[in-house]
Image (cartoon, rainbow, N blue to C red):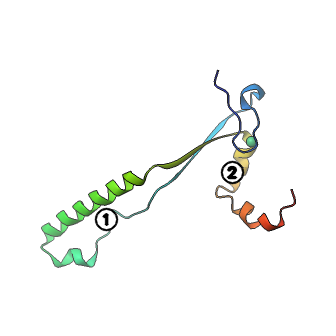
Amino acid sequence: MVHFTCDLCGKDLTSSGERRYVVKIEAFPGFDPTEIKEDDLDDDPMEAVAQILKRDETLVSEFEAEAPKGFRFDLCPSCREKFLRDPLGRDAVRSFDFSKN
Ligand SMILES: [Zn+2]
C-alpha cells in the first residue's frame, strides 16, 4: 500500500483518511514565441518569417532542455488551504524576522 504524508506538516494522510491534495509547481524560462525584433523586418519578408520560425525552434529546444523544473507535493486539506492563500510563501518570507513560533 502506498503511504502518503503531508509534505508541509507531515500528517499521515493514509491512516487519517483525510483527503490528499497534489500540488505541482513548475518553473521554466518564459519567452514570447511571436516576438518580432526589428532586425527581422529588414530582410525579405519570407526570409524573415523563416528566420523567426527557426529562432523559435531554438528557443523551444532551449526551453525543453531547461524544463522541467517541477515539484510535486502531497498536502493535507489544511495545508492546501494555506498554500492556496499564499502559494509563493510571501507571508512566511515577510514575517521571517518576527517569527516566534
Ligand atoms: Zn499538512
Image point 67% across, 27% down: which residue? Answer: 3
Q: Amino acid at mark 2?
A: Phe
Mark 1: is the Cβ under 8 angstroms from ligand 1?
A: no
Sequence-wise, the earlier of marks 2 and 1 is: 1
- Residue 87 found in image quarter: bottom right
Element carrying mark 1? loop
Residue 34 numbered tag: 1
Task: Give the total number of marks visible in the rendering.
Answer: 2
Element carrying mark 2? helix
Please tell me how crowded label 1 is: few (under 14), some (14-19), or many (20+) other residues with Cα within 10 Å: few
For the residues labelled 2 and 1, the Cα–Cα distance comes to: 34 Å
Q: Position of residue 76 (x, y in %)?
A: 72, 39
Residue 89 numbered tag: none
Q: Closest to the observer: 63 or 50?
A: 63
- Residue 5 found in image quarter: top right
- Residue 22 found in image quarter: top right
**Residue 46 higher or lower than 76, as above or below:** below
Q: Quadrant of ligand 1?
A: top right
Q: Position of residue 41 (x, y in %)?
A: 20, 76
Q: Closest to the observer: 64 or 47?
A: 64
Identity of the residue furthest to the right in this view: 100
Q: Position of residue 63 (x, y in %)?
A: 38, 56
* Left or right side of 80 for 97: right
What residue is disc 2 on?
Answer: 83
Please tell me how crowded label 2 is: few (under 14), some (14-19), or many (20+) other residues with Cα within 10 Å: some
* Left or right side of 54 for 70: right
Q: Position of residue 94 (x, y in %)?
A: 74, 67
Are the residues flagged by discs 2 and 1 in contact, CB closer than 8 Å? no
Quarter holding the N terminus is: top right
* Left or right side of 37 for 42: left
* Left or right side of 22 for 9: right
Quarter holding the C terminus is: bottom right
